[in-house]
Image (cartoon, rainbow, N blue to C red):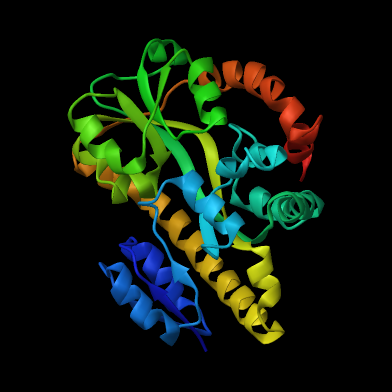
Amino acid sequence: MYKILISDDLSPEAIEIFKKAQGISVDVKVGLNPDELKSIIKEYDGLVVRSATKVTKDMIEAVVLGTQQMVTEGTANFGQWVPSIGVTEAPYVWRDAAHLAKVMAGPIGEDLNKQLIEKRGMRILGTTYYGVRQLTTTNKAVRTVADMKEFKLRVPENEIFLAMARAWGAKPTPMTFGELYLALRQNVVDGQENPLPTIDSGKFFEVQKYLVLTAHILTPRIVAMNEKFWQGLPAADRQVISEALAEGIAWNNQETEAAERTLVEKFKKAGMEVIQPDYESFRKPVLETVPKLFESRWGKGLFERIVDTK
């Protein structure tokens, strides 16, 4: 049994993934000060899970340095270290979750993992389906991409999302997730884009009037571990972690897809107006600009190889 401590305020969904995994024992102790954490960490196997309240780039760099052993983040956030991995969170590259799983388990995924190990000392242990990203707006009924002109859109702080927003004619406004609810409520930004389960857990439906089903990005998240830490584990422990992650990822993917099937109706009942926009008007300007803009980083033809994988 591999014993881990969750010492930050993770979402209930994230904690449940760990609790459902076989071979892992989980303790949740939130709000520990450094001295308290130091006094009890020896009771565990050294794998402390830290939450997304930390800055994404800092957490990834901490895994590189070995001060943090594991992180799960959207794949585009690893692009500054391994540029080609950014293609996995490109707009309109994935058809569905099955397409994502097939590519990441095949030669393309293996090559990305090899690059991450060689360049940054991190190993990809698994890829999760995090949902399809949709647009929400505070006051504006967006029906075509023309309605996005000068629209202040909150996006994560990575260049692919910034480029996509600009291709739509919007004004991309990066900010951390923790700031977003208040920014929407106070009209600091005009809207945001996230997968439906995130819109639900963040309660953005409370401060947004319109849900616009743009389906612009299928979001993968990778689970990455410090390679030196991984290689230092006994083979039996590596097997336990691999099996637990596979089980947890399968459960996560099923739950995410199930949630997406029900959340649109939930948001309608909460008072949101759901709009089915002109999909092609959003897709066309992005495909005309974004793949070309990042081809030198991703690798010539990689976007097309992923799209063509059947």
Residue furthest toward the bottom? 1
Residue furthest toward the front? 35
Q: Who's the residue at 53% across and 23% down the image?
A: 164
Q: Who's the residue at 67% across and 37% down the image?
A: 87
Q: Is residue 108 above or below residue 273?
A: below
**Residue 47 location in percent, x, y?**
49, 73
**Residue 102 location in percent, x, y?**
71, 54
Q: Is residue 40 above or below residue 164?
A: below
Q: Is residue 34 above or below residue 240?
A: above
Q: Is residue 269 above or below residue 147?
A: below
**In screen coordinates, is 208 left or right of 282?**
left
Can the viewer see residue 249?
A: yes
Can the viewer see residue 279?
A: no
**In screen coordinates, is 70 left or right of 28?**
right
In the image shown, does 108 or 55 lie closer to the viewer?
55
In the image shown, does 269 or 3 lie closer to the viewer?
3
In the image shown, does 49 or 141 lie closer to the viewer?
49
**Residue 94 location in percent, x, y?**
63, 40
Q: Who's the residue at 32% across and 65% down the image?
A: 12
**In screen coordinates, is 235 left or right of 261?**
right
**Residue 194 location in percent, x, y?**
41, 39
Q: Who's the residue at 54% across and 63% down the image?
A: 70
Q: How many marks?
A: 0
